[in-house]
Image (cartoon, rainbow, N blue to C red):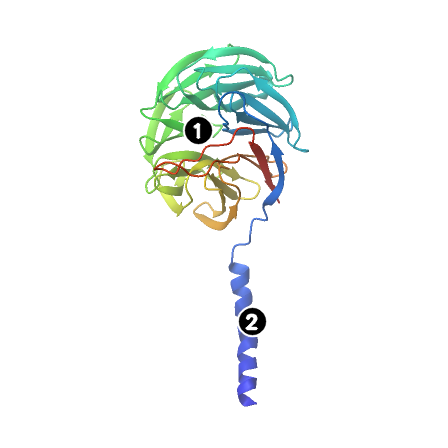
Amino acid sequence: MKVLRGVCLAVLLSLPLLGIVVLASPPGSGYHLVKSVPLGAAPGDAEYFDYVTVDPSARRVYIAHGAEVKVLDADNFSVVGSITGFKRCHGVALVPELNKGFITDGDGEKVMVFDIKSLKITGEIKTYPDTDSLTYDPASKLVFTFNGDSKNSAVIDPVKETMIKTIDLGGAVEQPVADGKGTIYDNNEETNDVVVIDTKTLTVKTRWSVKPAGQPVAIALDPEHHRIFSAGRKPTMLVMMDADNGKVLQSFPITAGVDANIYDPATGFVFSSTRAGVLHVFHEDSPDKLSPVEEIKTQFGAKTMGLDPKTHNLFLVTADFTPPSGPKGDRKAIKGTARVVIYGR
C-alpha cells in the first residue's frame, strides 16, 4: 500500500511537469488538404507547371501551365479563364495600378503583357533566353525578370512596356523577392549565394553565401524583421539570413527538390514545398529563432506554391508522374493530370 501511495504521489507530482512539456512543444500548423482542382492538359507536347501568383484583391490565382496561364477564383477554386499564346510560361507579376500583368515566356525569350480585368494579351517585350521568374518592385515601379541561362535580369518599364536595362548577375539566377523599399534579393543557384540588387541604381550591391545550403532556388522575406528564408537543393537546406548583412542565423535540412518558399506575416509561418511531396512548416518565434513545426505529406511533384494572405490558403501544383526510370530515376509528368491542390486551416 505504501508503495502504491508512493507511485501515485510521484505521478501526481509529475503531472505539472508533463503539462509544461506539452505547452512548450510547438503546436501543429493545422494545414490539411481542402480541395484538388484539375487543370486539364497543358498546351504543347509535355505536361508542365511552374510559379503560382495570388492576387488577394481581385481574388484570383495565376498558375503557369505549359503554354498557358490558368486563372482560378481564389474563393471557390473554379477555373475562370486562361491566358494563351506562349511557348512555355513561368511566372506572373501584377501591377494593379496600371491594370497590367506581366508573364515570362522562357522559350519565347519575351515577356507578355495582359489586361488584368479581361485577361487579354495587350503587348510583348523582347527579353533573353530562359526568361524565368519575375517581380514587380513598388519602390522603383519597375518589373525585373530573372533569366536563368542568360544569367542576368531584364529591367522593364511597365508604363512604356520597354526593357530599359540589363543587370549582369554572374550565374544562373532563380526566384527573387522585393522588400518594397528599393532592394531585391535573388537566389543564384550557380554561385550559391543571394544577390542583392539596388532597384534605384539598378546595380548589384553585394552577394551573400547561403552556406551550408547550396544551389538556392526558393526565397521568401520577412520585411518587418529583415529576415531572408532561402532554400537550396544541394545540400537540401533552408537557411534564415539577416537581410541587412547576409549572416546565416539558422539552417535546417529539408527534402529534395525545393522550389518555393513563403512567409506569412500574419501567422509567422514559413513554408517550403518540395518535389518529394513534403510541405515543410516552420514558425518564426522571434527574429533570431525559427522553429520546425511539422512536415506535411502532400503529393509528389508539388514543389511550387502561392499564398492567399486573406484566407491563408496555400495553392500547390502537381500532376501524376511516370514510375522512376533511367540511371537517375527520372519521372515525367503525365499529360492531362496537372492539378492544383489547396491546403488550408
Q: Percent from the top left, x then y, of residue 335? A: 53, 28
Q: Is residue 112 above or below residue 256?
A: above
Task: Estimate how packed mark 2 is, as few (under 14), some (14 to 19) or many (20 or more) residues with alpha carbons within 10 Å.
Answer: few
Provide the secondary structure element on which disc 1 rests.
strand
Is residue 253 visible to the viewer in this orientation of the structure? yes
Amino acid on which disc 2 is placed: Leu
Left or right: residue 185 compared with residue 52: left
Q: Are marks 2 and 1 in contact (CB under 8 Å)?
A: no
Q: Percent from the top left, x then y, of residue 166? A: 38, 16
Query: Label 1 belongs to which residue?
Result: 176
Q: Which mark is residue 244?
A: none
Q: Residue at x 51, y 23 (%)?
A: 66
Amino acid on which disc 1 is placed: Pro
Q: Is residue 7 above or below residue 202?
A: below
Q: Percent from the top left, x then y, of residue 9? A: 55, 80
Provide the secondary structure element on which disc 2 rests.
helix
Q: Quadrant of the C terminus?
A: top right
Left or right: residue 29 compared with residue 230: right
Q: Percent from the top left, x then y, of residue 232? A: 38, 38
Q: Who is closer to the viewer here, 14 or 115? A: 115
Occupied quadrant, residue 133: top left
Left or right: residue 216 compared with residue 279: left
Query: Label 2 belongs to which residue?
Result: 15
Q: Residue at x 51, y 39 (%)?
A: 263
Q: Alpha carbon of mark 2 to alpha carbon of mark 1: how far?
A: 49 Å
Q: Who is closer to the viewer here, 316 or 334? A: 334
Q: Residue at x 46, y 32 (%)?
A: 332
